[in-house]
Image (cartoon, helix red, strand yellow):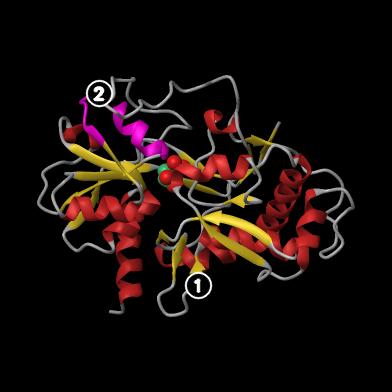
């Protein structure tokens, strides 16, 4: 079996196992607990906004290459490329293809489809590899036009950036050693559990009532190395990311149901509300004309048929 086939097969099993889920919309299953020293607890869920509700598209989608004057889309067109912020180590979402050197995956295709809508050419895109803890800042200050990076839309982040409508539904699970008796995150009380600094995952670990110890690292590959060197007992993050990590480690397994809901959306500076509306219009079109489904099948199709695309919500 090729490495990619093996990776995809493991990913399929992990995602299929996740079919039995107890996820709740944007919430946490357990009440807040004190965090480990040096690790900020996840902020209490903010119910004052509907995190999924984005800006409604207005008017007809402008033709590619004819972006309306005075808009951020026109600035992107003038620049000649869309700048996408993403990671390079998230298998099937945004990871470097070792044969071509290109960064590719479901998240990258979300960006390429916006470039297609602006220019009529999906290749007019510059990918900036960014850290997970830079996603909000670099979208907010306009360093990148878009962040598509397994990024959960939530109310705390939405205080600083706008988000597109949701394009993928993930949820947090746990990766442990194959011989571990643990069956859920709750069974890891007192154990060291790795997640990336700046991810929602790290704060979610701190909220588990049996008190696993959250350990922050710079990236998911760093968590995997820490796990393999016995510096941590487990890794916990979105099922999508964990499945990619499990595919790289035959001695690891993904356990338990999803215990959070992690809806992915693209982050965009609040300076360009017209661009958020444009992105949402492109997402609407691509969900309706089968492009979203084809993108799912390209990257995740080995897990079975594509689910219905997440429904857009507007405020
Ligand atoms: N989806 C979560 C987040 O946006 C965790 C995974 C990640 O860091 O990308 O924080």
Residue 209's disc number: 2
Residue 102's disc number: 1
* Nearer to the camera, 160 or 264: 160
Residue 58 shown in magenta: no
Quadrant of image for the N terminus? bottom left
Element type at mark 1: loop
The location of residue 134, given as percent across then percent down, is 50, 44
Ligand 1 position by quadrant: top left
Q: Find the distance from the CA under tag 1 to the CA under tag 2.
A: 42 Å
On screen, residue 87 versus residue 270, left or right, reads: left
Q: Quadrant of residue 208?
A: top left
Q: Quadrant of residue 80?
A: bottom right
Whether residue 218 is visible here, answered yes or no, is yes
Element type at mark 2: loop
Give the label, 1 or 2, closer to the camera.
1
Residue at (41% x, 36% y) in the render = 200
Q: Quadrant of residue 166?
A: top right
Q: Residues within 10 Å of mark 1 (few under 14, many from 20)?
A: few
The location of residue 178, given as percent across then percent down, is 14, 54
**Is 237 placed above or below 207 here?**
below
Residue at (67% x, 41% y) in the render = 269
The location of residue 69, given as percent across then percent down, is 90, 52
Whether residue 20 is visible here, answered yes or no, is no
**Is 243 placed above or below 170 here?**
below
Q: Which residues are magenta?
A: 198-214
């Amino acid at each position: 079996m090729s490495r990619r086939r093996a990776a995809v097969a493991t990913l399929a099993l992990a995602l299929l196992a996740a079919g039995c889920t107890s996820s709740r919309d944007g919430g946490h299953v357990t009440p807040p607990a004190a965090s480990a020293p040096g690790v900020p607890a996840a902020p209490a869920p903010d119910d004052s906004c509907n995190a999924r509700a984005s800006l409604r598209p207005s008017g007809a989608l402008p033709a590619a290459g004819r972006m309306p004057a005075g808009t951020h889309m026109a600035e992107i067109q003038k620049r000649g490329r869309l700048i996408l912020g993403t990671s390079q180590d998230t298998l099937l979402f945004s990871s470097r293809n070792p044969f071509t050197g290109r960064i590719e995956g479901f998240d990258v295709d979300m960006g390429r489809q916006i470039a297609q809508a602006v220019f009529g050419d999906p290749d007019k895109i510059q990918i900036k590899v960014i850290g997970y803890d830079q996603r909000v800042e670099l979208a907010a200050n306009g360093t990148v036009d878009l962040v598509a990076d397994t990024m959960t839309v939530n109310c705390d982040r939405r205080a600083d950036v706008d988000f597109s409508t949701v394009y993928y539904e993930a949820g947090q699970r746990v990766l442990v050693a194959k011989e571990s008796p643990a069956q859920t995150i709750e069974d890891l009380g007192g154990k060291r559990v790795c997640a990336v600094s700046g991810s929602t995952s790290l704060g979610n670990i701190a909220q588990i009532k049996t008190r696993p110890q959250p350990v922050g690292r710079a990236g998911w590959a760093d968590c995997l190395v820490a796990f393999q060197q016995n510096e941590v007992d487990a890794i916990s993050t979105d099922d999508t990311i964990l499945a990619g990590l499990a595919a790289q480690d035959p001695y690891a397994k993904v356990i338990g149901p999803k215990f959070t809901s992690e809806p992915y959306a693209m982050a965009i500076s609040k300076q360009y509300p017209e661009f958020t509306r444009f992105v949402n219009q492109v997402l609407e079109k691509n969900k309706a004309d089968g492009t979203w489904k084809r993108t799912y099948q390209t990257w995740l199709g080995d897990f079975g048929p594509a689910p219905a695309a997440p429904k857009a919500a507007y405020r």
